Amino acid sequence: MMSSRRSEPSLSKLSLITGKINRDTMTLLIIILFAVVLRVIGISWRPISNDEASHIYFGLEVLKGKYAYDPEYHGPLEHYMIALTILILKGWIMKDPFVLVWAVRLSYTVFSLIMIVVVYVFFRDYLGKLGSIIAALLFSISPEFLYYSRFAHEDIISVSFAVMTFIFAYRFYMDRQMKYLYASFLTFALLFATKENWLLYLGIWMSYVIVIVLIEELLIKEKKDTLFSRVWRFISETFIRSDVTEDGTIIYRLKRDTLKHLLIAFVLSFLVAFAMYSYFVYPEKFVEALLGPFHWVKRHHAPRIIGPLYYWFDRIWLYELFLLPGIILAIKKHRDYVSEMLLWWFVISFVGYSYMQEKLPRLMMHITAPAILLVSKYLGGVFSDFGKVLRKELSSKDSLRISLVSCLFIILLIISAYQSVLLNYINYDDVREPLIYARLTREWQDVYRTIEKIYSEKGSVRVLIVWEEGDYGLWPILFWLYYVEKDFREINVSYVKMYESGVLNTPEVEKYDIIICYSSKDQGKIHGFKLMGRFIVLKWIFHEKWTTETTLEGFIQDFSHYLNPRFYFLREYDSSKIETLEYWAAVYLKER
């Protein structure tokens, strides 16, 4: 299953003292710098979305001492993090509210960066030297990981802690060092405090061990170095010691030191999770957190976003095309237990999230994370052999095969990098991208800046919001006006909501500085106001049929959309064949 050979990068403390940086340290620093630059560029271009507004709202509630856990809005870790970010940068935010946008999003990027470091440093003996570099680079530029590490939502935190928990548990198995025991317990506690899918991760990992042990013990006659024997050997070597008495009797005893570390790790992790969920005020919330996953089981039966079983296949095809052949070739070449567990992790996640009817695009990270690790190991070997081909160290027969495979994956990786650039820096607010949903368009940033300008000139801003029915999509705008501008920054911004558009034809509107009309009708001209523009509040493009049913005919029709080169590379599509839903609002400014 696993070799005892250590292959961690030599990131020595001495290099920090002497000022000398070895090659491994330099490689890691370059990768981290690369990842940071990718995450910082344009991080505040997008206006705050529905979900981000909700999370920042709860961060503000933490500062007011009013926060209480609600599984609908996930674990408390991110809300505490947002509260801390706001507390540290409050002075800047009071002067410029846009600091809030990039500061909060930047705090989320930290977790993806830590995950990259952990993958590079602590998973190298499995991935190999080149494989660890490839994995770190893939997590840096992967379309979904890059996009949602620049997005204030808990999934990047959750998947980062899941990957770290797995790697630290692996390292504890390999080295028997207590620091990895503590690290695995702590990262799992933080995963538990982040999102309710902690139970799914635990179930995936444990189910692999149980299934393989049962298969090997019950179905395989020739039992040699099985998973059960390895697990038992690990338990006996780590937690049990044997003593021989004077008469030659062997007595087995538990290792008290190891059990002490295990108990301390468990207690510390429990206290971290309990403190976060209870907020030192609501101890019953910890019990509610244990039952939190079942809230999302109910949500499966009353979903907000639905789709057929091939929903995630379409997105992997579009954004991470190299994973599809990579997984097949990787498991064909590597038959060790770790590779099999990563494959199991990917398959169960893919099947599970395909079945679940709460298909939020950001969940794709939970599916692709183990696949990226598995394929990185394979690519490390392929590109290492390709280097030998270039140095003419292999036979011509092997050279042709290796060269073809290497060139194929280089092309596929370039396509994935292109998709990442398209998603993150060009179409970052465009729902033509299947990974984007429920987002205000970039023009709303100009509306917010206009509000700031009016306030700086007049010392107050009055906003009238008119809509006919419902307010789906307006929450981020209302959040910005009330909770950011009025409540937090304490500037004189007031808004009035009215459901009758007839008010626009009365003198009543003259006292407002800005009018936002959220209506299916074009209001035309409003006396005393000029039209700033009509901006998208919410837009859906249904790349797949809005249905829970999966049919071959539906798959062929929907997948043909992804096979179209104009959509694949330019996101151009035939609007007559793709269903869209659009909500927009007209913004009017008072004439001077």
Image (cartoon, grey):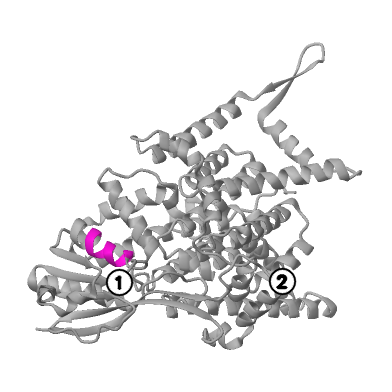
Q: Secondary structure at mark 2?
A: helix
| Residue type at the position of mark 2 | Pro
- In the picture provided, is 130 more to the left or to the right than 58? right
Q: Position of residue 13 (x, y in %)?
A: 48, 50
**Which region shows up in magenta?**
475-483
> Which mark is first along the chain, 1 or 2?
2
481 is within the stretch colored magenta: yes
Quick one: 481 or 328, which is closer to the camera? 481
- The answer, for residue 74, to whether it is visible in the render is no
Q: Main secondary structure of the magenta part?
A: helix
Q: Secondary structure at mark 1?
A: loop
558 is within the stretch colored magenta: no
Residue that extends furthest to the top in the rendered view of this protein = 247
Instruction: Look at the numbered discs 2 and 1 and tell me whether their residues touch, using CB distance below 8 Å.
Output: no
Name the residue that disc number 1 marks: 468
- In the picture provided, is 393 more to the left or to the right than 523? right
Quick one: 579 or 42, which is closer to the camera? 579
Name the residue that disc number 2 marks: 325
Quick one: 50 or 146, which is closer to the camera? 50
State the separation of the CA atoms marked 2 and 1. Answer: 50 Å
Q: Position of residue 244 (x, y in %)?
A: 76, 18
